[in-house]
Amino acid sequence: MRQSPTVPAPDVSGGGDSDIAAVGSLVADPGRCRILLALDDGRALPASRLAAEAGVSAATASSHLGKLTAGGLLTVEAHGRHRYYRLAGPEVGELIEALQRLAPAAPVRSLRQSSRARALRQARTCYDHVAGRLGVELMRAMIERGYVAGGDGTYDPAVAVEDGRTGYGKDVEYVLTGAGRSFLAEFGARIPERRRLMRYCVDWSEQRHHLSGAVGRGLLDRLLELHWVRRSGDSRAVFVTEEGGAGFARVFGVRV
């Protein structure tokens, strides 16, 4: 009797193409998007706070948080009887910033919404670094002073690099110069280890580059420590203090 030829099992060890739809389905729900935006300042928040931010019931928030955690966009930490959620990493923050750059502006229907939108564009956190007009101006100042080299802060989607590093966040290779290292040390900014030193995001409201990576994180931590900026209690906006306004002008030449 003739035997059928043996068909080798497919090799799936390397995986197929990226499943963008899997991530797309997670951000397709407005409630889940509001949860991600609430966490885009890098902090960990409890489910009750996230339910309020999303405007949904506790049960619905629990379902959303479960899907976002299972999908790899969030991590969860247990503190006693409470569970706190945060973005799974800077890549998720970059995803949120990129989506905001592509998304249409939400309608503004009240003075409060208008004030909040203006504050976010002026200065905000993008995961663990400064974004908005303040973030872009700090990036510009560091480039002009020779602390950062490799680009001029301009976002150009048509730029392509010969070695294939094209696309969002990869078209420019910024480096921290020796002068930049000396400045950060003198300024008192502590740079976290085990993080890529220099990264950048395309700022969705300014359409220019702002600084991220370990340097961006260390800079934000120092600004908070100096009380040059303070966090908002109910949004990702950060507000420049009177002391900070003088400090930004003196140290960076940035007038807020």
Image (cartoon, rainbow, N blue to C red):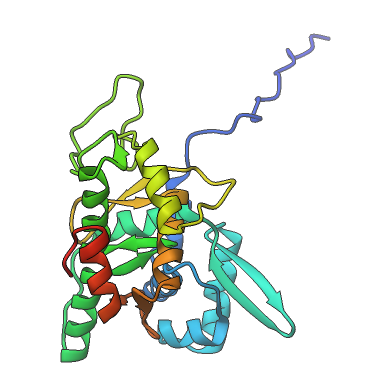
**In this picture, residue 170 sits left or right of residue 191:** left
Q: Is residue 83 visible?
A: yes
- Residue 112, above or below 240: below
Task: Identify the residue shown where x is 47% and y is 39%.
Answer: 18
- Residue 139, above or below 248: above
- Residue 3, above or below 226: above
Q: Nearer the viewer, residue 220 or 119?
A: 220
Q: Nearer the viewer, residue 107 or 247?
A: 247
Quarter where residue 70 is shown: bottom right
Q: Position of residue 196 (x, y in %)?
A: 49, 42
Quarter where residue 155 is shown: top left
Q: Which quadrant does the N terminus fall into?
A: top right
Q: Position of residue 232 (x, y in %)?
A: 36, 82
Q: Nearer the viewer, residue 89 or 35?
A: 89
Q: Position of residue 168 (x, y in %)?
A: 31, 42
Task: Identify the residue shown where x is 32% and y is 75%.
Answer: 238
Quarter where residue 169 is shown: top left
**In this picture, residue 230 sits left or right of residue 135:** right
Q: Which quadrant does the C terminus fall into?
A: bottom left
Q: Nearer the viewer, residue 73 or 246?
A: 246
Q: Is residue 24 visible?
A: no
